[in-house]
Image (spheres, rainbow, N blue to C red):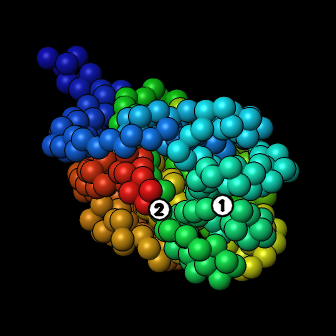
């Protein structure tokens, strides 16, 4: 009996018990969510990806289940294949970064051939210098950024729609992870200067906790003496990000700054109002999320119910302390965030909204 009691009190036993409890709650939540209602459009769609693996995969899988045919086409092959296949819709994600310089000319040629061209800008407002030029090349513009709708309309884009981002639940989902992914606190993302300032200010608070800070440019931290052991430099692929979210007790979300200069090309100084894809992805893993506040957050989640928020470092520290000490409240809020996300914020839901415009 003594050995059994010792085993039950061991850290590995306790961790296994907590993992099982969390996953059981998540499974019960997902089983209560009804499947999507049948939907079908008799359309052939070309989807031209950006290279954001998590988003591209979610969109293409959703479209494949909703239309007659979805063909994923790389930008350099778009024009010639479209002439041959004659799709009903050419859907470009973002049209930035990895796209060839002449791709807007190809878009104009496709429009001249009578094909409907569409772009969804999912990096707004951080590249307004580039999207301002591109927006009028397309028949229809979607943006995930609430603040960019009137901006594109003012530039002459006549058919502009707000379409928030979403999550691919086949990728971001509750799962069991190994000890290498277990942390008290997790943040994954590049070291934009607003993020660096927050973590530098929190350094003493975080020093004695098990913390992961992962992504590019974290050598910018001033408090390497206290935080260096928590930093993992470099890109974390989505498949591993999922495991870190699942393994963390608290996941922090800090939105990218919207100021022009430094890491942005937001020359038109459009303020960021909309939530980032990580908001959905963290919640879809059944993880407890504390995020900074964007204007349209309350259109999707209920702070204090299925997500929590902070407006200062002191508030963030206080909430982290609270949730690390209150396991049941942390699990319950994470479960409610999972329910909200799976019910309303998947790419299936977003692509239905998208297709209704055509």
**Left or right of 275: which side holds 90?**
right
Q: Is residue 124 above or below residue 44?
A: below
Q: Position of residue 9 (x, y in %)?
A: 27, 30
Image quadrant occupied by the N terminus: top left
| SS at circle 1 | loop
Q: Determine the residue positioned at 50% across, 68% down.
A: 161
Residue in front for this viewpoint, 135 or 199: 135
Can you give x and y, in whole percent of width and height, for residue 129 in the image?
78, 70
Which quadrant holds residue 262? bottom right
Q: Residue at x 58, y 81 (%)?
A: 150
Which residue is under mark 2? 164
Residue at the outermost front position = 113
The dot on residue 333 is none
Residue toward you, 237 or 50: 50
Instruction: Please state if 103 lies on the left or on the right of 167 as rendered.
Output: right
In the image, what residue occupies the spot 31% across and 68% down? 302
Callout 1 crowding tier (Cα within 10 Å): few <14, some 14–19, many ≥20: many
Q: Position of residue 73 (x, y in %)?
A: 65, 34
**Circle nearer the N terminus (1, 2):** 1
| Image quarter in which the C terminus is found | bottom left
Number of residue marks: 2
Question: Which type of secondary structure does the marked residue at label 2 adopt?
Answer: loop
Q: Do we see residue 252 in this rendering?
A: no
Q: Nearer the viewer, residue 263 or 47?
A: 47
Q: Which mark is residue 138?
A: 1
Q: Splitting the image into 4 quarters, where does residue 286 fall?
A: top left
């Amino acid at each position: 009996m003594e050995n059994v009691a010792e085993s039950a009190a061991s850290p590995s036993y306790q961790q296994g018990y907590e993992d099982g409890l969390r996953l059981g709650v998540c499974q019960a939540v997902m089983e209560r969510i009804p499947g999507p209602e049948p939907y079908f459009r008799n359309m052939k769609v070309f989807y031209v990806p950006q290279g954001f693996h998590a988003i591209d995969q979610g969109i293409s899988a959703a479209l494949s289940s909703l239309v007659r045919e979805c063909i994923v086409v790389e930008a350099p092959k778009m024009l010639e294949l479209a002439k041959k296949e004659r799709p009903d819709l050419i859907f470009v994600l973002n049209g930035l970064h990895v796209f060839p310089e002449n791709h807007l000319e190809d878009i104009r040629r496709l429009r001249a051939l009578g094909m409907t061209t569409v772009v969804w800008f999912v990096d707004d407002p951080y590249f307004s210098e580039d999207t301002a030029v591109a927006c009028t090349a397309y028949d229809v513009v979607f943006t995930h950024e609430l603040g960019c709708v009137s901006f594109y309309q003012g530039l002459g884009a006549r058919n502009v729609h707000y379409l928030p981002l979403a999550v691919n639940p086949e990728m971001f989902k509750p799962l069991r992870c190994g000890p290498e992914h277990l942390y008290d606190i997790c943040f994954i993302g590049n070291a934009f200067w607003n993020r660096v300032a927050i973590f530098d200010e929190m350094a003493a608070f975080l020093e004695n906790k098990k913390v992961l800070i992962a992504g590019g440019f974290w050598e910018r931290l001033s408090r390497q003496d206290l935080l260096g052991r928590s930093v993992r430099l470099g890109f974390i692929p989505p498949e591993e990000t999922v495991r870190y979210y699942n393994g963390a007790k608290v996941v922090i979300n800090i939105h990218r700054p919207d100021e022009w200069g430094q890491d942005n090309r937001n020359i038109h100084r459009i303020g960021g109002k909309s939530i980032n894809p990580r908001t959905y992805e963290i919640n879809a893993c059944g993880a407890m999320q504390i995020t900074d506040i964007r204007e349209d957050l309350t259109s999707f989640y209920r702070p204090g119910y299925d997500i929590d928020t902070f407006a200062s470092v002191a508030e963030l520290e206080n909430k982290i302390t609270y949730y690390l000490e209150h396991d049941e409240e942390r699990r319950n809020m994470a479960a409610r965030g999972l329910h909200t996300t799976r019910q309303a914020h998947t790419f299936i839901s977003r692509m239905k909204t998208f297709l209704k415009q055509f």
